[in-house]
Image: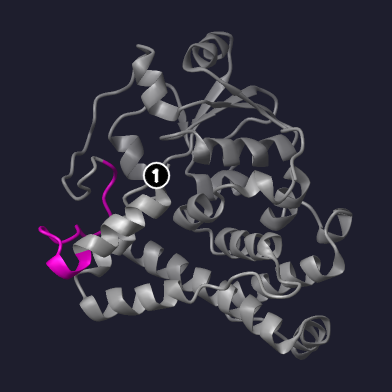
Amino acid sequence: MTTRRAYDEVSADEAQALLEHGAVLVDVRTRWEWDTGHVPGAVHVPLERVRRSHAIPRDAQVVTICRSGHRSALAARWLARRGARVVSVRGGLPAWVAAGHEVTAPRVRSAASSDGGPPAFIAPPRPIPIAFRLPLRIVRRQTGMDVLPARLLTWYPRAAVGAAALESTAARPVGRVDARMLKLVRMTVSFTASCPFCIGLNGEGWEALISEEELAAVQGLLDLAQVSSLDDRERLAIRYARAISATPIEVDTALGTAVAAAFTEREAVALAATAAQVNYWARLIQGLGAPAPG
């Protein structure tokens, strides 16, 4: 399912032209990434704060930028839903630098991330234990990225093995809980937990399964009842995922009864397990300070 985007992507040169005519550049990367170099004059608003930030003007043309274009695109969608005139820089800061535009000199440097990206609170072991090298290569091949949390877990082999076992049992489509519903649940938990890494990872390929309007509802920007393309079970699954992700957990009797009535026992367990799995990763990743991918 695809819909017309509520924002546009522009090249680095096009973004520069907009800035010269008064546009505001919003950098949605993490603080560490910002400190390693940013566009002079940009406003720094990390992705997880974009929806609540008052630093982004509502009456100006806005340009969003990140490391690859993925997080800035998410930010652009949120801002467009608020009525902003917004575009996202295609290719992120590397494209900006490649086009010859100015960035500030780095204020901090760290060797914590072997691929040159931002570090977590701790560095992964060097070298990685032999038993985990092949599994990590497989993870990198499957995801297309060097997943820092997986490398960090190798400090504590029990945790690494347990996390791998948990990931191997990730819910697959079952009955009426199809791939689309699982995507809705995973993204709901990612946004509820305000986990940039999870948003980036679980948001991959969302356009093939859900619409712009549905994405806004998952983010909490639209009331679920306003989105006619969501059916009753999908709305219930989103509410259930939000309740499981709240602190303290807020699955009351009425909600639990509704889930039991709408889904089979197997489907209900698949929904709960999916929400719990993303919550585990969200808290582990943020606890270790792993930055968002892209």
Q: Amino acid at mark 1?
A: Thr
Query: Relative to the observer, which residue lies in front, 153 or 20?
Result: 153
Quadrant of the rendered structure where residue 247 is? Answer: bottom right
Model colouring: one colour
* Residue in the image at 54% along x and 9% along y: 17
Above or below for 227 versus 172: above
Q: Is residue 145 magenta?
A: no
Where is residue 101, by image quadrant? top left
Asked if residue 124 is among those painted magenta in the image, a careful observer would answer yes
* Horizontal relation, residue 187 to residue 268: left or right: left
Does residue 129 lie above or below 30 as drawn?
Answer: below
Instruction: Return the residue at label 1.
Output: 30
The C terminus lies in quadrant: top left
Expressed as whole percent of the image width and height from the top left, the position of residue 204 reads: 54, 48
**Residue visible at 25% across and 81% down?**
158
What is the chief secondary structure element of the magenta stretch? loop
Element under label 1?
A: loop
x then y, percent, for residue 116: 23, 40
Of the pair 204 and 238, the residue shown nearer to us:
204
Magenta-colored span: 117-132
On screen, residue 235 versus residue 124, left or right, reads: right
Residue 280 visible from this viewpoint: yes
What crowding class fits label 1: few (fewer than 14 Cα within 10 Å), some (14-19), or many (20 or more)?
some
Q: Is residue 276 left or right of residue 233?
A: left
Residue 248's spot in the image, x, y percent?
58, 81
Relative to 21, does residue 27 appear above or below in the rendering?
below
Task: State the residue in front, 94 or 45.
Answer: 94
Farthest residue in the left direction?
Answer: 127
Question: How many numbered tags mark residues here?
Answer: 1
Q: Residue at x 83, y 86 (%)?
A: 261
Task: Examine the rendered structure and indicate whether residue 273 appears above or below residue 117.
Answer: below
Q: Position of residue 169 (x, y in %)?
A: 48, 77
